[in-house]
Amino acid sequence: MFNFSTIAAILAFSSIASAAPANRREEWSTSYIAPSISGTTTGWVSHETSSASSYSTSLSYTQSTSSTEKAEASATGNAPAPTGAGSPATPTGLSKVQQILLSDTRVDAINNVLKDDADFVFDFNKARKFGPGEGGEVVTANRKAFPALTGTGIGMAVGFLGPCGFNTPHVHNRATELLIVTKGKVVSEMVVENGVENADKKPRDIMNTIEELQATPYFMGALHTQFNPTCDDVVFIAPLSSEDFGANTIAQAYFSLEDDTIRAAAGNHIDGADVDKFRGIISTNVALGVEQCLKTCGIAKR
């Protein structure tokens, strides 16, 4: 049996606990239990839900609530929100990408920002501008154009090159590209970096003709270009290893402050008929290829 001093100590402790601030009581009654790996490969399971049928597909921490708190919540109608419930929507005035980046979880981003099923579709046909150059264009799906890509680490470009058109030499600042031709063929060139040389100790120009359903990679930061050597339209797709891959057109960037003709051609795509304007700033192989293509297709130079 309890003696008088024991009973007095229990009453004193209860008095102190009831007088403590609410936030302290909540802190005492809430604990976080690190999840443990169950003996299967189906995912992570918390200590609270360790039965074979209670597997979680994500690594998370489980908040345990005392029975007293549960009873109080039930009595007052303030039941805790179900697991996975979205947090309040991000304040307006921000782009979708900004709202996604500010979301606490991917679940919140999908529930509160990417609310429509149409947010997960990007139409390359509708995104075409048929420019800036007459030789074709490349339509890019980065996270700005397609916010659903935010956080995925992947982007995409689709290229449309007209007869004898070429995509001028450029690099991607933050991504490796895998170009796949889906219609026609392109002549591809890549200069990787200093030190990659041919037998003559000159920078190696990796040049290939990529046929339909063939592919070639362009390493991050490597200078590369494509041109259409035929009189027909060409289409290629190009997955990139970043949702914000970037592009720097070398000739236009280098000469942008020096020559009005070069400055006027700031687009990525050049009509082959303008080849003479760019002879000094594009590779010899591309220039000669475009020359031959123009003759074959009966296209006059401007």
Image: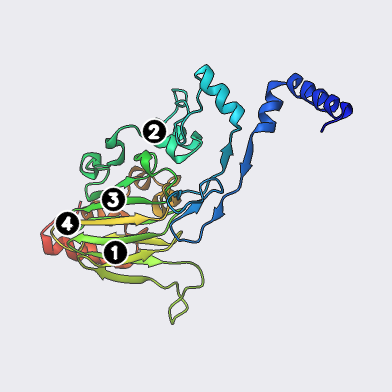
Q: Earlier in the sequence, mark 1 or mark 3?
A: 3
Q: Seen in the image, is 83 located left or right of residue 282?
A: right
Quickly name the residue at label 1.
Answer: 286
3D distance between C-alphas at marks 1 and 2? 49 Å
Say whether residue 23 is left or right of residue 256.
right
3D distance between C-alphas at marks 2 and 3: 39 Å
Label 4 and label 3: CA atoms lie apart by 12 Å
Residue found at the far top of this picture: 76
Say which residue label 3 marks. 269
Q: Is residue 73 above or below residue 243?
A: above
Q: Which mark is residue 111?
A: 2
Q: Nearer the viewer, residue 93 or 245?
A: 93
Type of amino acid at the residue the image marks with label 2: Asn
Q: Identify the secondary structure beneath mark 3.
A: strand
**Label 4 element class:** loop
Q: Residue furthest left?
A: 298
Q: Amino acid at mark 3?
A: His
Calculate the distance from the C-alpha at mark 1 to the C-alpha at mark 3: 13 Å
Q: Mark 2 vs mark 3: give the one in front.
A: 2
Report x, y in % for residue 237: 27, 56
**Mark 4 belongs to which amino acid?**
Pro
Instruction: Give the percent coordinates (x, y) of residue 239.
Output: 34, 55
What kind of residue is marked 1? Val
Q: Earlier in the sequence, mark 1 or mark 2?
A: 2
Give the mark nearest the N terminus, 4 or 3: 4
Q: Residues within 10 Å of mark 1 (few under 14, many from 20)?
A: many
List the single residue furthest toward the right. 5
